[in-house]
Image: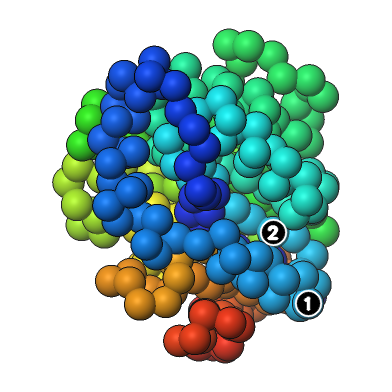
Amino acid sequence: MFRLAHISDVHLGPLPALTFLELFSKRITGFVNWHRNRRRHLFANTLDIVLEDIERRDPDHLAITGDLVNLASTLEIAAARQWLNAAGTPENISLVPGNHDAYVRGAYEKATRAWYPYLRGDEAPMEWEEDRHLFPYLRVRGPVALIGCSTAVATPPFSASGYFGRRQARETVNLLREAGKAGLFRVVMIHHPPIRGATALHKRMIGIRRFAATISTGGADLVLHGHTHLDTVHWLESGGKAVPVVGIASASQGPGGHRPPAGYNLFEISGGPGNWNLMRERYALTPDGLALTLGETTRF
């Protein structure tokens, strides 16, 4: 049995001091939003409690589906790398970026360079290379193939959309087929929910139909996403079977907000090709914000 933990939307805080030039961009809207809303409910100690609970359950691997930072400033990106180092090794953690990690032009490149060991495919070069397509990537851990996709793009103010393009779709199909032929359980990681209507129009993923065709053509067993800060389960079709598409609340969301409190998914994967078994345990923060408790168990 392979045990895979899943968190998303880490949103490391608090915000560092930003220069005037850093704020003279889309960041000013995010800066105001943080101080008006997010800082009231996103707490670093909540994230610590989540990670400590995950560590106690000792999963085989941790999947993180984006938004490590808030405004993607240089200081935030560096702090996120330090946080990743403390959370675990690149061998045991797989990451894909979110829209906040590509908040303004140039941020995506800085973030992928800094976090490269955690989003590098098994066959990719050891060192980050500029102008090279990182996504999709393939990592094999035990009986599981982790396929990381990116929807992270810089967007105008008041927009948080993502993009899944033709090249990435084509290459993802190839990786899914390769993993299927190898008899692996295929997990696709992506930040934006690949489900129509799952989020507001200005936060949607452009290329939802393309992603659905990718899953249908290539084959998959589980899709993990973040972005909505909600605990959700949707479905996509692949080869006549329903593939669960699972989202999770922000890993830093404290109690008392209008979004669900922080939590994580713990998947147990057993069986083998043609007879995979998948069970999910969803853990959520208690009302006092001091611990996590089992909220739901689902067999897919």
Disc 1 versus disc 2: nearer the observer: 1
Label 1's element? helix
Give the residue at the far left of this rendering.
201
* CA neighbours of label 2 inside 10 A, class few (<14), some (14 to 19), many (20+): many
Residue in the picture at 52% in, 49% down? 13
Residue at x 53% of width, y 54% of height: 10
Question: Which residue is found at the position 51% from the left and 48% from the top?
Answer: 14
Location of residue 276 with respect to 31 vertically, above or below:
below
Q: Is residue 235 left or right of residue 11?
A: left
**Residue linked to disc 2:** 62
Task: List the residue tagged with mark 1.
Answer: 56
**In the image shown, does 150 or 270 lie closer to the viewer?**
150
What is the distance, in whole Å, between disc 1 and disc 2 at their CAs? Answer: 13 Å
**Figure label count:** 2
Q: Is 180 left, or right, of 264 in this rendering?
A: right
Indicate which disc, 1 or 2, sits on the residue closer to the N terminus.
1
Q: Position of residue 86 (x, y in %)?
A: 78, 51
User: Could you say where residue 188 lies in the image, as x and y percent from the top left?
Assistant: 55, 51
Specify the amino acid type for callout 2.
Leu
Identify residue type, mark 1.
Arg
The quarter of the picture where the N terminus appears is: bottom right
The picture quadrant where one finds residue 197 is bottom left
The residue that appears at 59% across and 66% down in the rendered structure is 45
Q: Is residue 232 visible?
A: no
As drawn, the residue found furthest toward the top would be: 131
State whether residue 113 appears in this view. yes
Q: Secondary structure at mark 2?
A: strand
